[in-house]
Amino acid sequence: MKTYRLARRLAQLEPSATSAMNARVQQLRAEGIKVISFSVGEPDFDTPTPIKAAAIDALNKNLTHYTPAGGIAELRKAIAARVSADQGLAYTANQITVTTGAKEGLYLAFQALCDDGDEAIIPAPYWVSYIEQAKLAGATPVTPMTSEATGFRITPEQLRAALTPRTKIIVLNSPSNPTGAVYSAAELRALADVLLESEAIIITDEIYDAISYVEYARWLHVAPELAERTLIVNGASKAYAMTGWRVGYVAGPQPIVTAIKDIQSHTSTHTASIAQYAALVAYTPSDELDQTVRDMAAAFHRRRDLILELLAEIPGVTCAVPDGAFYVFPNVADLLGRPLKNGAVCATSDELNNYLLDQAHIACVGGESFGAPGYIRLSYATSEADIIEGMRRFRDSLG
Ligand SMILES: Cc1ncc(COP(=O)(O)O)c(C=O)c1O
């Protein structure tokens, strides 16, 4: 096949391990094998009916034309009201830009803020796109490794040690993908005290805020004095089961949000008009929708308890209790480097992951993808029946 000289910045780009795993799962399924997937990071629920109805209505009204860059005014206004209520601080519509998923919001934030040689502190285990997005913006990721002992939460000492005069950004993600860790108010306050000594911009990725099994502490509630240096990233994907609609947002200081919109005006311009009208319903106060979101979170809570109970029965596997999102991040170090069923030996969690796919027909993601060898990530956004069957296969495959 012909080779092409691609842009140099792509030399460092790692392909997404989750996408590679999904491709293998599709291949096995095409061969007729019933694979149970714990690798996908999306709710298995349908988008709530009132949101779908708003999209159909928008289509019928022919609201299918370009919208302003950064989204329609009504949606930015509704999101500003939501953010103001969430954070306890006043946000206006011009401090909001609607993005093509939170993922694009994060990408644009890195692009708007980073120069070559800047550093971005991204505590590990991390959601891998932060790393690739930082690199694409010319920044160097700095990845302090948190430990299972501190519930995978970065400590003030670790944060202080990671800060340098080149630190441009620190990413906080609570609840976390992949660990499910949720920071308490006291923990966030201790981090804020350290950050007051720096000039870093804080990106708080709150995409899993609706799925917290403990009282959710919000960064700006705890550290309002850092609002002028904080970008809030969130979106409709996880809370409203709207992953495919691609609606996210960035809220923050107007000059940074305007810079992000300027880049948007030359790239995507805006997410699909229909998706914006649907999201307008999601972000308009409604007791009914609030209840739907709480019901989905309650289902995730039950599934978390179920998968933890079943993982505890698997010899060689231990698992910290995640307080939010829909992931468990078990420690599988004891399964590595020793014979499993049929004498197979897995040296790494990535290899174990392939073993589990081949032997147990369950799909997980190796901890390597999140900067944490020795762990695997399982998403329990799947049915209780699949969780029970999948964990049975996991246990049986080890011999
Ligand atoms: C931590 C985290 N942030 C952001 C996103 C992006 O979500 P979306 O682009 O669907 O809004 C995800 C999706 O998996 C995520 O896990």
Image (cartoon, rainbow, N blue to C red):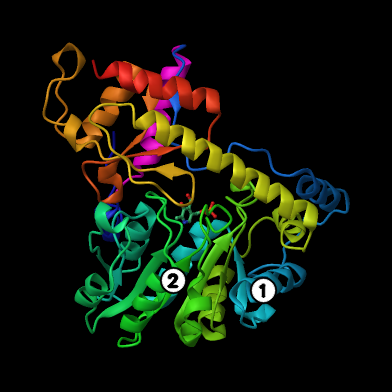
Find out whether residue 11 is within the magenta segment. no
Label 2 crowd bin: few (<14), some (14–19), many (20+), radius 10 Å: many
Amino acid type for the residue under numbered disc 1: Ala
Q: Residue at x 79, y 59 (%)?
A: 286
Quarter of the rendering occupied by the C terminus: top left
Quarter of the rendering occupied by the N terminus: top left
- Name the foreground residue: 16 vs 397: 397
- Secondary structure category for the residue under label 1: helix
Q: Residue at x 50, y 81 (%)?
A: 256
Q: According to the image, label 2 marks what residue? A: 203
Q: Would you say 205 lies left or right of 81 here?
A: left
Residue depth check, mark 2 versus mark 1: number of the one nearer the observer = 1
Predominant SS of the magenta segment? helix
Please give the count of numbered marks on the rendered protein: 2
The answer to whether one can see residue 220 in this image is: yes
Quarter of the image for residue 160 reads bottom left
Q: Classify 337 as above or below 243.
A: above
- Name the foreground residue: 60 vs 241: 241
Q: Position of residue 354 (x, y in %)?
A: 28, 27
Q: Position of residue 361 (x, y in %)?
A: 38, 19
Q: Classify 301 as above or below 345.
A: below
* Residue stretch in magenta: 14-31
Quarter of the image for residue 17 reads top left
The answer to whether one can see residue 26 in this image is: no
Q: According to the image, label 1 marks what residue? A: 85
Q: For marks 2 and 1, give the CA distance.
A: 19 Å
Q: Classify 391 as above or below 55.
A: above
Sequence-wise, which precedes: disc 2 or disc 1?
1
Q: Position of residue 76 (x, y in %)?
A: 69, 71
- Secondary structure category for the residue under label 2: strand
